[in-house]
Image (tube, grey):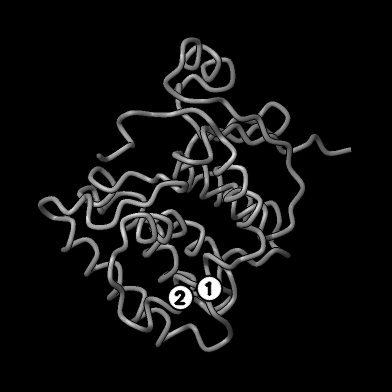
């Protein structure tokens, strides 16, 4: 019997990097166990270090294997469960999906730092510091281009749900929290992500959390 997949995550209200692989697994219907460690509390770091020497979440544990990066976790899951089709089948679409995912993984620093994920908050107009609008413009341009080129088969960036959508799901949450104005095509895509059935348990759990991380509460 194969050992279970165990995903170690942070707060569901705040941890955007935890959401990404969690959503990829959930949307693909892949069974996994979850360990939630509230961040920035006494003992949090030590508890995370029990699972990964990197000292950060998310972490995927599979038997003796430890994978400690969001995109690496998604890649591992896609390889282990090819039937889930977490990457597009077409080589050009797949390469483009990987590029879009990697851009999210390494970029958009202004948006990520000034509009921290806070799913239960409503802060219209906040987080509009230097560089944020440029990040918003690039993201929405990318969404429109991917939908126009690859999205004919469904509501997501490459038609059916993929890792690329999991990577941008926290951005959808940010745009809602801070009421970022979107063009119609980007709004339709964002609404499709927000309505994804696999995302609903995460959103419900985020609203039920009571922990508060001051750095993610833009006043």
The residue at the point 53 percent across, 20 percent down is: 48
- In contact (CB < 8 Å): disc 1 and disc 2: yes
Q: Which residue is mark 1?
A: 192
How many numbered discs, if any? 2
Camera-side residue: 122 or 114? Answer: 122
Q: Which residue is mark 2?
A: 189
Quadrant including the N terminus: top right
State the separation of the CA atoms marked 1 and 2.
Answer: 5 Å
Q: In the drawing, does residue 104 fall left or right of residue 21?
A: left
* 217 w.r.t. 124: above or below: above
Q: Secondary structure at mark 1?
A: helix
Q: In the drawing, does residue 197 fall left or right of residue 152?
A: right
The residue at the point 52 percent across, 16 percent down is: 49
The residue at the point 63 percent across, 50 percent down is: 77
Q: In the drawing, does residue 110 fall left or right of residue 124?
A: left
* Residue most extreme to the left: 130
Percent position of residue 45, x then y: 46, 16
* 148 w.r.t. 101: above or below: below
* 195 w.r.t. 48: above or below: below
Percent position of residue 142, x then y: 31, 73
Label at residue 215: none
Q: In the drawing, does residue 81 fall left or right of residue 191?
A: right
Q: Secondary structure at mark 2?
A: helix
Percent position of residue 212, x then y: 43, 29
Q: Residues within 10 Å of mark 2 (few under 14, many from 20)?
A: many
Quadrant including the C terminus: top left
Q: Residues within 10 Å of mark 1 (few under 14, many from 20)?
A: some
């Amino acid at each position: 019997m194969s050992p279970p997949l165990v995903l170690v995550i942070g707060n569901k209200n705040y941890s955007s990097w935890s959401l990404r692989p969690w959503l990829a697994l959930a949307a693909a219907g892949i069974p996994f166990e979850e360990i939630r460690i509230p961040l920035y509390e006494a003992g949090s770091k030590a508890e995370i270090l029990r699972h990964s020497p990197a000292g950060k979440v998310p972490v995927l544990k599979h038997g003796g294997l430890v994978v400690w990066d969001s995109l690496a976790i998604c890649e591992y899951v896609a390889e282990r469960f090819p039937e889930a089709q977490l990457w597009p089948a077409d080589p050009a679409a797949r390469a483009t999906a990987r590029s879009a995912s990697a851009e999210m993984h390494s970029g958009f620093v202004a948006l990520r730092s000034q509009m921290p994920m806070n799913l239960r908050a409503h802060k219209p107009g906040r987080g509009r510091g230097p560089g944020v609008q440029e990040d918003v413009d690039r993201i929405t341009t990318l969404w429109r281009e991917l939908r126009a080129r690859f999205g004919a088969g469904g509501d997501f960036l490459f038609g059916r749900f993929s890792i690329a959508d999991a990577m941008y799901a926290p951005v959808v949450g940010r745009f809602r929290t801070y009421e970022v104005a979107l063009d119609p095509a980007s709004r339709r895509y964002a609404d499709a992500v927000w309505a994804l059935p696999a995302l609903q348990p995460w959103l419900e759990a985020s609203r039920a959390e009571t922990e508060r991380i001051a750095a993610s509460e833009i006043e």
